[in-house]
Image: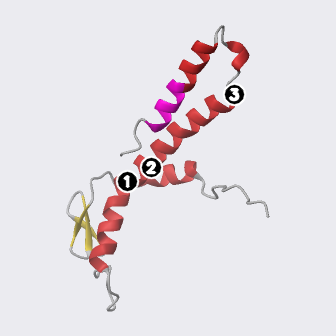
Amino acid sequence: MTEKPIVSVRNFAADRAICEAATEGPWTADGSYVEIPDDFYVGERGPLAYGGVEGGDENATFIAEARTGWPAALDRIAELEAVVHRIATFKPENFTSDKRMIAELQRLAKEASANDAR
């Protein structure tokens, strides 16, 4: 059985627009509320655990971290897509020696893994 390639069904351009339209961060979790600049609280009419749902504090932390985490992930996706494009269009015949070709492949590999620890 052949495995199907993983294909993203997300529209990263639309996700980026959502990030850009949101109130600038940083956002912070304050218990089960999310505080954004100007002392506005998401969940102001009730905590994110409203109605006895457990995990409100964790949900608030997740939402607050997503404000900066998701744009950072989108940036990294764009960087890696650019590297993948350069690898996909790589042509060995464009190099005058094996040594130069290997050096370019090593540079691309280093670029792809440069910020994996983010």
Q: Tell how many labels.
A: 3
Determine crowd level at label 2: few under 14, some 14-19, many 20+ residues with C-alpha closer than 10 A: few
The CA distance from mark 1 to mark 3 is: 30 Å
The secondary structure that dominates the magenta segment is helix
Residue 44 higher or lower than 50, as above or below: above
Say which residue appears at 63% left-offset and 31% top-offset: 87
View extreme (front): residue: 98
Q: Nearer the viewer, mark 1 or mark 3?
A: 3
Question: From where the camera sits, is residue 44 visible?
Answer: no
Span highlighted in magenta in the image: 106-113
Magenta stretch: residue 105 in it? no
* In the image: residue 117, left or right of residue 40: right
Q: Secondary structure at mark 3?
A: loop
Q: Tag 3 or tag 2, which sits nearer the N-term?
A: 2
Amino acid bearing label 1: Gly
Up-down relation of residue 83 to residue 37 (above or below): above
| Contact? badges 1 and 2 (CB < 8 Å) | yes
Q: Which residue is mark 1?
A: 69
| Label placed on residue 89 | 3
Q: Is 36 displayed left or right of 62 in the figure? A: left
Q: Which label was assigned to residue 73?
A: 2
Residue 38 falls left or right of residue 72: left
Q: Amino acid at mark 3?
A: Thr
Crowd tier of the residue under label 3, counting other residues whose Cα lies within 10 Å: few below 14, some 14–19, many 20 or above? few
Residue at 40% across, 47% down = 72
- Asked if marks 1 and 3 touch (Cβ < 8 Å), the reply is no
Compared to 13, does 106 lie above or below?
above
